[in-house]
Every structure is written in C-alpha cells, then in structure tokens.
Amino acid sequence: MTILVTGGAGYIGSHMVLALRDAGEDVIVLDNLSTGFAFAVPETVPLMVGDFGDSALVSQLIATHKVTAIIHFAAKLVVPESVTDPLGYYLNNTSKARNLIECAVQGGVKQFIFSSTAAVYGHVGLEPVKEDAVLHPVSPYGRSKLMVEWMLEDVAKVTDLKYVVLRYFNVAGADPQGRVGQNTRDATLLIKVAVEVALGKRPALQVFGTDYPTRDGSGLRDYIHVTDLAAAHLDALTYLRAGGDSLVANCGYGKGYTVLEVIDEVKRVSGVDFNVVRVPRRAGDPAAVVADATRARTLLNWTPRHDNLTEIVTQALEWERRGHNQR
C-alpha cells in the first residue's frame, strides 16, 4: 500500500513524508522542485521529479508502485501573486488537479487527501469559522482550491473514490527533531519572514494593513504547527482506510494571534528588535481567519500536540539559524 505524495519536497509535504515514514508507510514523492528541495526528502523515499499534471507520468507511478492513496500538496499558494496571475493559478492548482484526480480514478486509487485552505471562506468575522460557513473566496488562490474541492465532491458521487479535504489555516514551525523545516525562497508566510529578518537575512518586515477591526488593527490568524498538520493527514488516512465517508475538515487551533503579536513574540524569542514597516493592505487579505476544528478533532480523532506560539517560533528560528535553507 504505497502512498503518493505530490509536492513532497516542499514545506508541508516534506513534514508529511517524515510522518508517513515514522508510521512505517511506503511512500513515493512527486515534485517538480520549483519550490521544493530534493534534500528535504529522506534518502529512503523515492523522489520522482516531474509535474503532478502529467497524466502519463502519474498513471505510471500509480501502476508501478501500486499506489492506494494520494496526498496532494503541490500547488501555487501566494495570494497576492494569484491576484496578478489568475490564469497561472487556475492552470496549476485546478486544471492539473483535474488530471491528477482522473489518474486516481482510472488507477483504482480509493483514498485521496487534499490540501485545501481557509482562503475558501473569504472575509469572515473574528469568531472561529465552521466548515459549513458560506464559501466566498476573494482571491484566485482561494477559488482555485475551492474548485478542486467541488471536483472531488462530484467525482466521489459517481466513483468509489473517497476523500478528505483539509482546510489549512496559517502553517508555521519546523520538525521538532530538526530534520526538516521551511526552506522556501522568497517566502511570504509571516513567521518564516519574521525569523529571516531577525537573523539579518532581510532588511525589514512589512506589516500589510494596520486598520483592520482587530484588537491592534493588524490581521488576525490561526497559526498551526506543521507537525500537527501532518498528524491530521495521518488521522485522515486512518479514517478513510477504516471506511469513513468523504468529508471536509478545518485544521487550526481555534484561536488567533495578530500580526503585531506574532512579531513581538519573534522579537522576544530571538532577542532582536528588528525593523518593522507598516504598509497598506494587500489585495485578497481578510481581516481575520480562525478555525473551528471540532470536526477534525471528533471525526478524525485529531489531537494537536504543539499548540504553542513560543514553540512554533522557537523551532522556526532554530531551523533558520542552522542555515538549512542555504543548502
């Protein structure tokens, strides 16, 4: 029972691969290395360098490695970039995902876990959002992901494919054992950028918008440790293997920190009072997004173990400090 992980050389995907190997699973990674890194994949895990939208390649991998489940991470994920390049996002995130799903169905893959996003909700209030909230994504990124959710829903109605869609909130941190972390070049995720600034790898940190209706005017987000997120995927796989029905579940902690609060924590942990520049809001950014993850906790039996901002920041900082991303 081999599991195909698309985007397994990327930030979240590489943590997923480690979690699967730690659990004794057979894994193969498909990644075009446009943003991922070969060194992030364990030497014991086969890495195929290629595009997840390449139907011939994917079909070959499924048949050759007897793939029974696919965990799909590969995607473009920068919200502002999606606003300026919508066709690029619909091609990569939606059209190619359609090919991947077709290959899964034709290859007899019965379980599919999809990396979705809280961006499908759009502008929501300050309270934790549930999966049955109105979906109104405000960026092509969010829309491109929602379209894949719709495709999975429709395909599952007429085939024996079962899926779990996990809607991520703000992912951060690094493997607690120090084996892998976020290596993304020109990253846009707040904690990654902040620790780079603290270590002098960037001159300053920009805060996009300080006039939101939050407690200090900066954006409010639910930050989830990447290892807890990988664990949610393992729980989803167990759920599907046990015959669970297709479902959508949020992955977050149910509480939020503002951008300015996160910056203060990075300054405290690093001991560096780095330069912060306040600039106007970015297109497509909601004021606040916090998860109600009750469904994941109850139906998937997901139990987060790293719900601690200090731990998240400390591990991200230590990974950055060791300079792994310079390899």
Image (cartoon, grey):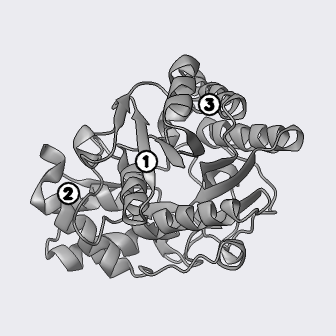
Can residue 275 be seen by looking at this rendering? no
Which mark is first along the chain, 2 or 1? 1
Q: On the picture, is 135 further left or further right than 22?
A: right
Q: Which residue is mark 3?
A: 100
What is the distance, in whole Å, between disc 1 and disc 2 at their CAs? 35 Å
C-alpha distance separating marks 3 and 1: 17 Å
Residue at the location (56% across, 51% down)?
285
User: What kind of residue is marked 3?
Assistant: Leu
Instruction: Report the amino acid beneath label 2.
Output: Val
Is 280 situated above or below 23? above
Choose between 225 and 270: the one closer to the eye.
Answer: 225
| Residue 128, placed above or below residue 241 | below
Q: CA distance from mark 2 to mark 3?
A: 38 Å
Give whichever of discs 3 and 1 has the lower sequence position. 1
In the picture, the quarter occupied by the C terminus is top left
What residue does disc 2 label?
A: 197
Question: Could you say where residue 230 lies in the image, as x and y percent from the top left?
Answer: 47, 63
